[in-house]
Amino acid sequence: MFSLPRILTDPPGRRLGHQALILNRDGAVLLIGTTYKEGLLLPGGSAERNELPHLAARRHIETETGLALPLARVLAVDYVAMQLLPEGMNLVYWGGRLMPTQEEIVRRHRPPAEIVELRWAHRAELADAMEADQHRRAEQAFAALGRGAHLPMLLRGVPAA
């Protein structure tokens, strides 16, 4: 049974979500399973009020996976209309291709209780592992990565560090 996270019980006026496409040496994608959502997700989460977007992404990803990654390139921006939750925007960052030591960090990491699974999945497996909207978002991020396309993460016009 899924428990409701705070975002469902006390939703913000708008949602700004941050996820990352993170690959291992074999090209598999790092996914998380949660207690509050069906299907697997790219790691990440929502920003708090006045939290810098890339720092929100870093915070969630480190909590969920143990990885501290520089997230300065946005691969996709996904608008989600209001339904159960207020309207929102999701940014998908390029988390990079991990080194063996980073993969070991993920393997050893013990995430918080709401993260019930950390799994590597190859691109061909994503449609079965993820909800349709999450899969489409991941595919668009892969497409941008394949084209070498990205948006820089800017803070008042200056690239974020």
Image: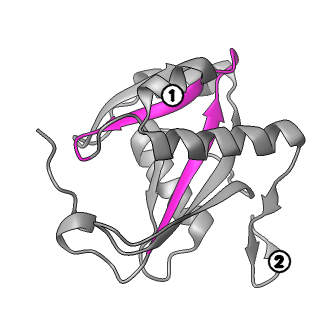
The quarter in which the N terminus is drawn is: top left
Residue found at x 63% / y 46%: 69
SS class, disc 1 = helix
Q: Amino acid at mark 2?
A: Val
Q: Find residue 147 and report its horizontal and vertical position in percent.
A: 88, 41
| Residue at position x 43%, y 26% in the image | 129
> At which x and y percent is residue 131?
41, 38
Residue 142 sits in quarter:
top right
Quarter of the rendering occupied by the C terminus: bottom right
* Residue 44 appears anywhere in the view: yes
| C-alpha gap between disc 2 and disc 1 | 36 Å
Q: Position of residue 103 (x, y in %)?
A: 57, 23
> Where residue 158 is drawn, which disc sits there?
2
Looking at the rendered structure, the secondary structure element under dot 2 is: strand
Magenta span: predominant SS is strand
Q: Give above or below for 122 relative to 39.
A: above
Q: Residue at horizontal 51%, vertical 28%?
A: 127
Residue most toward the left?
A: 1
Left/right placement of residue 97 relative to residue 51 reads right
Residue 21 vs residue 146, the one in the foreground? 146
Query: Which residues are drawn in magenta?
Result: 15-36
Residue drawn at the location 43% of the way across and 74% of the way down: 87
In the depicted structure, whether residue 160 falls above or below residue 101: below
Q: Is residue 28 magenta?
A: yes
Q: Residues within 10 Å of mark 2 (few under 14, many from 20)?
A: few
Quarter of the view holding residue 15: bottom left
Q: Label 1, on which residue?
A: 127
From the viewer's perspective, tell me whether residue 84 is left or right of residue 137.
left
Image quadrant where residue 116 sits: top left
